[in-house]
Every structure is written in structure tokens, then in C-alpha cells.
């Protein structure tokens, strides 16, 4: 099983305070897809949600992880309102 600690060790620059602030990330979780066993980085974020004088909103984004190196891959286009939606999505992955 891969943990958030493993992912942070493999991608130290990604989790810097500067990057976290730049991307609007609030927290991170690592979850496994139920169908494939692939692992994913789940980002709770406010990224770009406060543009054009809008109130910031919290949502979740998913980045696949390389299954060997744990490199963080480009995020999926999907956006999720809560962790339950994320978990339901990962049941098919």
C-alpha cells in the first residue's frame, strides 16, 4: 500500500508551502481505485475558484500517480463536490 508520505517523498517540491498556496490546495489524500488498484492523489482545493470576484469554493481534483515511481501525473478533468463523489468515481477506476 502506498501512503501520502511515500508520495511526498517522491515529489518533495510538489508539496512545498509555495506550491500549496499557488495551487490553492487545502489538503491531500491518497486513495486506490477499486477496479485496477491504481493509486491517485486527491486534492482538496480552491484553485482558481475565486476569479472574477466570485466567492472561493472548495472542491476535489484527482491526479493519477505513476504506479512505480509515484510521480504525480496531470490531473483529470473531473471536478468533485465532496469526498463521497471522489470515492464513487474511484470505484470504477
Image (tube, helix red, strand yellow):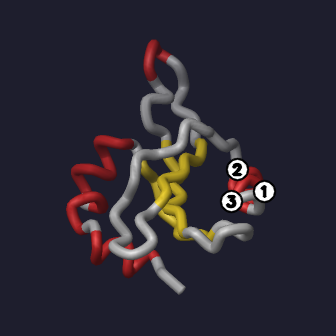
The C terminus - image quarter: bottom right
Residue at 45% in and 71% down:
67
Mark 1 in CB contact with mark 2 (< 8 angstroms) = no
Label 3 vs label 1, nearer the camera: 3
Residue 2 x, y percent position in the rendering: 48, 81
Of 88 and 17, nearer the camera is 88
> Which residue bears the numbered disc 1?
88
The earlier-in-sequence mark between 2 and 3 is: 2
The secondary structure type at the circle numbered 3 is loop
Disc 3 + disc 1, Cβ < 8 Å: no
The residue depicted at 38 percent of the width and 80 percent of the height is 6
Above or below, comparing residue 76 to residue 10 in the picture: above
Q: Which residue is drawn at the image coordinates 73% and 68% (left, top)?
A: 35
The residue that mark 3 highlights is: 93
Classify residue 88 by image quadrant: bottom right
**Residue at image point 42% right, 50% down:** 25
Q: Is mark 1 on a helix, strand or loop?
A: helix
37 sits to left or right of 66: right
Nearer mark to the viewer, of 1 and 2: 1
Q: In this view, does 62 lie to the left or right of 8?
A: right
Q: Name the residue under label 2.
A: 82
Q: Is mark 2 on a helix, strand or loop?
A: loop
Q: In which quarter of the image is the N terminus?
A: bottom right
Q: Where is residue 76 in the image (x, y as percent from the top left)?
A: 53, 43
- Residue 68 x, y percent position in the rendering: 39, 75
Mark 3 vs mark 1: which is more N-terminal?
A: 1
> Pointer 1: residues within 10 angstroms few (<14), some, or many (20+)?
few
Residue furthest to the bottom: 1
Closer to the camera, 49 or 38?
A: 38
Amino acid at each position: 500500500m502506498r501512503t501520502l508520505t511515500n508520495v511526498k517523498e517522491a515529489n518533495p517540491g510538489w508539496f512545498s508551502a509555495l506550491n500549496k498556496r499557488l495551487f490553492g490546495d487545502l489538503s491531500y489524500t491518497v486513495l486506490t481505485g477499486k477496479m485496477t488498484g491504481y493509486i491517485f492523489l486527491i486534492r482538496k482545493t480552491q484553485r482558481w475558484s475565486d476569479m472574477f470576484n466570485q466567492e472561493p469554493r472548495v472542491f476535489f481534483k484527482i491526479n493519477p500517480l505513476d504506479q512505480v515511481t509515484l510521480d504525480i501525473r496531470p490531473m483529470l478533468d473531473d471536478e468533485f463536490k465532496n469526498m463521497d463523489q471522489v470515492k464513487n468515481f474511484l470505484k470504477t477506476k
